[in-house]
Image (spheres, rainbow, N blue to C red):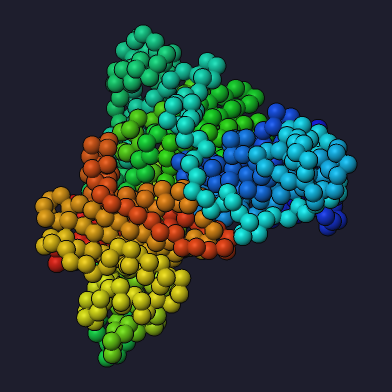
Amino acid sequence: MVYSLAASTLTVAAPLGCDSSSAADAEPARAASDVLVTGTDEEMLVLQVTAANRVVVRLPRVEVGQGVTTAVAMMIAEELDARLGDIDIPLADARARGNQYTGGSSSVRSLYGPARELAALARAKLVTAAARRWGLPGWTLRTRDTKVFAPDGRSATFGSLTASAARITRTTVSSRPKPASRHRVIGTPTARIDARDIVTGKAKYAGDLAVAGAKPTVVARPPTLGGTLVSVDDRAARAMPGVHAVVKVPGGVAVVADSFHHAFRARDALRITWAPGPLASLSDAAIRSRLRAAVPRLGTPPSGSAQTEGEFEFAFVGHAPMEVLTAVADVRADRAEIWFSSQAPMDAREAVASAVGLSAAKVKVHVLRGGGSFGRRLNHDAAIEAALISKAARRPVKLMWSRADDVRHGRMRPASHHRIRASHARGRVVAFTHATASVSEAYDGTGLSAQGGARALVARAQGPLPSDSGLYNFGRVDGDSGSVELPAIPLGPWRSVDSGTMRTAEEILVDEVARALHKDPVAFRRTTLRSKTLRAVLNKAASAGHWGRALPAGQAQGVAVHEEYGSCVACLAEIDVTDPKAPRVTRVVMAADVGTAVNPRGLEAQLMGTAVDGISTVLTAGLHIDRGAVRESSYADFRYARQRDAPLHFEAHLMPSRREPGGAGELGVPAAAAAVANAYARATGTRPRRFPLDF
């Protein structure tokens, strides 16, 4: 149900499917335009039409580059018949209740119904208001370009009608969303509404804010993970020009100064003695050994079957978004205010309040756009740290993690080890077993409770799920998992969470099963996939990518599929390993069925991003642990794919559908990673087992 809110301008709200009851729930079930609610319920998505002819929807999600603001604006424009340029999608501050999580590829799915219902009701009220003003039947009026038009050519902007529309309790035209057959905006490739602001510098990130009195701040951190401060001589740092404060925090020693240049110089002048972290004697080889030993046994295979087996290792992987963690904090004795990019702002508010000794009601969290995330901003380490520094320094601060801080002390995808066995007899798989072990969370990375509502997603990353028994007709499918506790390893949800390793390993083994059965990998999948939709995307990728075409020596194709979030995808990759030390993915073709693609251009960008993720994590990008410390410190040695590593040719094919949207942001990672690995295996005649390959 959609509700009207008591306001001087047209303001309507739709609940976001929360469990707790709202103020409007006490109203009897009636037509949407009959229900009037005083105030704005925090569990709702709220749309307002201003007198300046702007349509404003304060979004309870965060924009981190995935294009959710554009998708929501398109939903609103579709149902309201407004121009995209007249729609504003600011980000909502942290609320007291409701659902404000951005994760699990859920944003478009969760907002698709409420956003369209909001706009459809708003349009009905505006048309009804215009009909009353002109004395005409509502059905004779039309809407377009943020205006209502009469048959004789008269027009009125939505803004000029908003006050009268706010008083409408019964609409004279339908307030139902349009059927998909009438969509003109949804499904049309559209440029991002914030693209110009981003490229011209108008878009504001946490580092761009000019909060009164907030001084640039950096932190000196221990050389090993989980290292602790023994002593600090800060006399030289305090004496340097531009330095305002030097304070201790759980993660190290913070310097507050006039500029980041001053802050970094003073940080480097600190003379600190550190106690090593609990993993100071541990490096990669020992971690891999522990993980291997923690993988549960596979058990006895079916009698009379042959076995295709594989063991796969995946390294730790950092998020490394382009924008490093930055947070502005102003903590006073009786209140606190925080500005940063958060995928879980409600949890962040609770965590900050607990850290600084205030009630959550006294803490205000402003959500800002983020320059990338990939799951990293589900954690709020930087916000808590900034709040503690502000409290200790007794002044507002603008904290920025350096790139080295982000790589060496930031969250990471856990390392994992997988043991998979496919049992086959009489030309088909009769049993499939996948056992795995990963590093479990035993440390939060800052000495603070910074996990909050992201914990469930992290748990997925640490305790991978058994194989998806519904994907292939593989007889008995089972799995088990173990874990290794490594105190001081800071973990966090990484794009696609457990699927990025689980499904990648499985799709590699599926190729090896096809080889053992003397079958083509695509043909084998066609005959064993359970889902018609999956077969359709596989067929599309194979045909568009010209599967099986002749390639020169040292080049090959690979293919893989994945299904999750109510969506499915297939990926075909071509690789050139003529230079064994520099394998290059030359071509990627992806086909996806995500239901209704609200913005096909945005979806193609998401799929392209997942292709780069797959290329990176399979070929070059991972984090080493050397004697309790992360070896890498920047993009120079954390070797994520650059432009020169991107496919020379990329294409995405979106399957037509009128069902509601599924998830898409993380969907392509497992298929892309596995397709690249399978292409590498075919090109080299090897069986890759450790990823990235250069580890």
Determine if residue 337 is in view. yes
Give the image location of residue 240, x and y in percent. Answer: 34, 10
Give the image location of residue 406, x and y in percent. Answer: 35, 36
Give the image location of residue 537, x and y in percent. Answer: 41, 67
Residue placed at 51% from the left, 55% from the top?
597
Residue placed at 30% from the left, 56% from the top?
588
Determine if residue 308 is in view. no
In front here: 640 or 377? 640
**In the rendered image, which quarter is residue 526 located in?**
bottom left
Residue placed at 71% from the left, 44% from the top?
143
Q: Quadrant of the N terminus?
A: bottom right
Residue placed at 27% from the left, 36% from the top?
634
Number of callouts: 0
Residue 457 is left or right of residue 363, and the answer is: left
Residue 125 is left or right of residue 611, and the answer is: right
Give the image location of residue 613, x and y in percent. Answer: 33, 50
In front here: 234 or 50? 50
**Residue lying furthest front in this view?**
152
Residue 428 is left or right of residue 497, and the answer is: left
Residue 640 is left or right of residue 134, and the answer is: left
Using the image, determine if residue 586 lies above or below residue 529: above
Using the image, determine if residue 25 lies above or below residue 372: below
